Amino acid sequence: MTHATPPSATSSAVPPSQGPLAGLRVVEIAGIGPGPFAAMLLADLGADVLRVDRVAPGGLAVLPQDKDVLARGRRSVAVDLKRPEGVGVLLDLVERADVLVEGFRPGVAERLGFGPDVCLARNPRLVYGRMTGWGQDGPLAPSAGHDVNYVAVAGALDPIGRAGGPPQIPINLLGDFAGGSMYLVVGVLAALVEARESGRGQVVDAAIVDGAAHLLTMVTNLQQVGAWNDARGTNLLDSGAPFYDVYETSDGLWMSVGALEPQFYDEMVKLLELDDLPDRFDLASWPHLRETFASRFAERTQAEWAALFDGTDACVAPVVPLRDAPNHPHLAARGTYVEHEGVVQAAPAPRFSRTPAALGRTPSKPGADTREALASWGIDDVDALLASGAVVQRDPS
C-alpha cells in the first residue's frame, strides 16, 4: 500500500514545536476516548503534552498504549495519584502548565487532591479542561455512560436511521469525538485567549451531551419551523430524499448521492441517462425516484460509476471502504492519510500556511518517559521520587 505523505508528517524527527501551539504546556490525565483524542489534537498542533498515566494498568484498553495512535505526539510519565507524593508531583507539573485535561467523573479529581480549586491556587492562569459525558452537574452527572447513551439523551441518535427502522449508531464520531473532544479543544483554546487578557484561568466543562445538542442546531431549528419531520428517514438529509442517499452497485459496493441543488441534480440525471422523471420535490414521487436510481446504479460496478462521475458537479461519489480510503486519489494527493513509523493514520488537521502541524513522536508505553520528561519540566529530585514509588520509570522497549 502506497501512501502520499505531506511534508509536515514525514518523520518523528519533525519537532511538534513547529506547530501553531508551540510553547504551550499541557498536562493530560490519562483516560479513554475523547480526552486522549483532544490531547492528541493539541499535540498535533505543537503543544508539549505530558500524559500522566497510572502506575498500574486499569480501565478499558482496546490497544496497548504504545500501539494506540490516540496517544501519539506526547511523552508518558507514570504517577501514583493515590499517594500524596504523587499528587504533589502532579501539582508541581500544574504549576508549570498552561492547561490540564482530565476526564474523571465529577468529584473524583477533587477527592484525589487535584480539583480545580487546588490547581488554580497553584497556578491562577491554568485552563482546567474537564471532559465528561453528562457534564459536571445535573441528575445524570454521577452516572456511568458511553457515547451511545450521551447522543441518545441529547436527541442526536433518534433522527439517524432508515424510515421504519431503529436508530442507527454512528460509531463514536458524533458523541466522543465531535460532541466531546472538539468542544473541549475549542473551549480550552478560547479560555487560553481570554487568559492572555485577564491573566486568569478557568474551568472548561466539556460535556458530550452539550456538544451533541449544539451540533444539532440546524436540525432542531428546522424541526421547530416545521421543515423537519419527527419520523426518521423521511427528511431531506436523513436518507428520506432519493437524491440524498446511497445506492448499491453491481459489485455489492455503494455510491453516495448528494444532488440537492437543481443544477447538481440535473447533472446527475443527465449522467445517469434518465428521462421523464417526476418532480423531485413531489414527496409522492420519492419511492418511484428511489427505485429508478437504485435500478440504474445496480447496472454497473462502483469503479465504473466513480469514473463516470469523477470531476463532475453531480455530487456523486463512491462510498470508499475504510481500509481503502488512504489510497483514494484525492486523499493520496493531499496526504490526508500517512504511513508514520509503519502505522497508517490520519495526518494532522487542519492545515496551516506558516506553522504546519506535525505528527511528532510515536505513542509511548505508560511511564516510558518518566525520568526524562519530569526533568525537562523542571521537577526536582526525580531520583528520589522514583525511589519512593511516587513515580515509576517503565522500560520503553
Image (cartoon, rainbow, N blue to C red):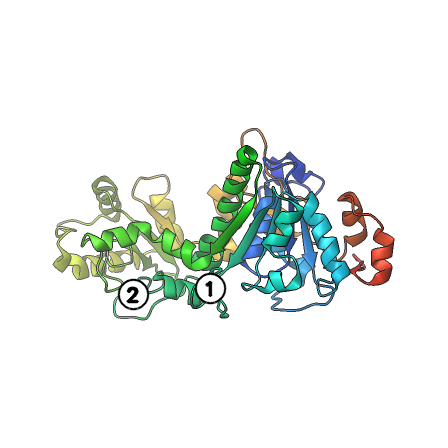
> In the structure shown, which secondary structural element does the residue marked by tag 1 occupy?
helix
Q: Which mark is residue 147?
A: 1
Relative side of 276 to 24, left or right:
left
Q: Nearer the viewer, residue 153 or 241?
A: 153
Identify the residue shown where x is 18% and y is 54%: 226
Tell me where residue 17 appears, x and y as whole percent.
Answer: 66, 37
Tell me where residue 281 appears, x and y as whole percent.
Answer: 15, 51
Q: Nearer the viewer, residue 168 or 337?
A: 168
Q: Which of marks 2 and 1 precedes in the sequence?
A: 1
Q: Amino acid at mark 1?
A: Asp
Identify the residue shown where x is 75% and y is 58%: 367
- Where the C terminus falls, by quadrant? bottom right
Q: Quadrant of residue 111?
A: bottom right
Tell me where residue 387 appears, x and y as whole percent.
Answer: 87, 60
Q: Quadrant of residue 65?
A: bottom right
Relative side of 304 to 116, left or right:
left
The residue indicated by pointer 2 is 162
Disc 1 versus disc 2: distance between alpha carbons? 21 Å
Tell me where residue 20 appears, x and y as whole percent.
Answer: 58, 35
The vertical placement of 299 against 56, above or below, is above
* Badge count: 2
Relative side of 271 to 69, left or right:
left
Between marks 1 and 2 in the image, the one whose residue lies nearer the viewer: 1
